[in-house]
Amino acid sequence: MTFSIRLLDESELTPTGEILGEIRIGEFLENFLVTPIHGEIAEVESSWKKELESLINGTSVIALRTDPKIAWLVYRHGETCTFQEQLLLPEFGYTSADGSIIKLPEYNNLTENGDKISEWHAPLSDVVSFIGLTHHSSGTPNGAP
């Protein structure tokens, strides 16, 4: 399996006691700070799984929130998933003042200046394996390019 996302256990907190998460996409591995948006930290992993299930069931883009303003966006292109870590700022209309998502950005792999946005790819089957669902190929989800 080349995809996973999880909260690290309490023995792996930062020196200042902050909670860390970990994402693996192929050979790429990154730890990141996790700040719950609403509710308890225990709800973070279940919200990620719910979003991933939505992606498998045909949603073309989801947000795996790690902070009120930061998320791993996952774009589904047929049987391939593209991951980008992005800021979701209220001033761009993506989130409200309370951190709720209003809309997600459409897929783009270039910045305003024409530079490539860092992104990683994994087969949808790896996402399916990670959350333990049975999936039948359904082609391109609604709204996907």
Image: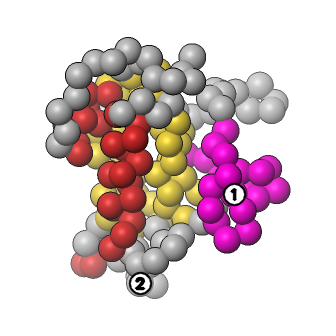
Q: x, y (%) of residue 134?
A: 17, 33
Q: Quadrant of residue 22?
A: bottom left
**Magenta segment, principal secondary structure?**
loop
In the depicted view, which residue is nearer to us: 110 or 137? 137
Which sits in the foreground, 113 or 132? 132
Image position of 105 (left or right of 127):
right
- Which residue is under mark 1? 95
Q: Which residue is mark 2?
A: 17
* Quarter of the figure that contains the N terminus: top left
- Do residues under tags 1 and 2 come within 8 Å of each other at their CB atoms? no
Query: Magenta stretch containing residue 29, yes or no?
Result: no
Q: Is residue 112 visible?
A: yes
In the figure, residue 137 lies in which quadrant?
top left
Q: Residue at x 41, y 78 (%)?
A: 40
Q: How many marks?
A: 2
- Which residues make up the magenta segment? 85-105
- Identity of the amino acid at label 2? Gly
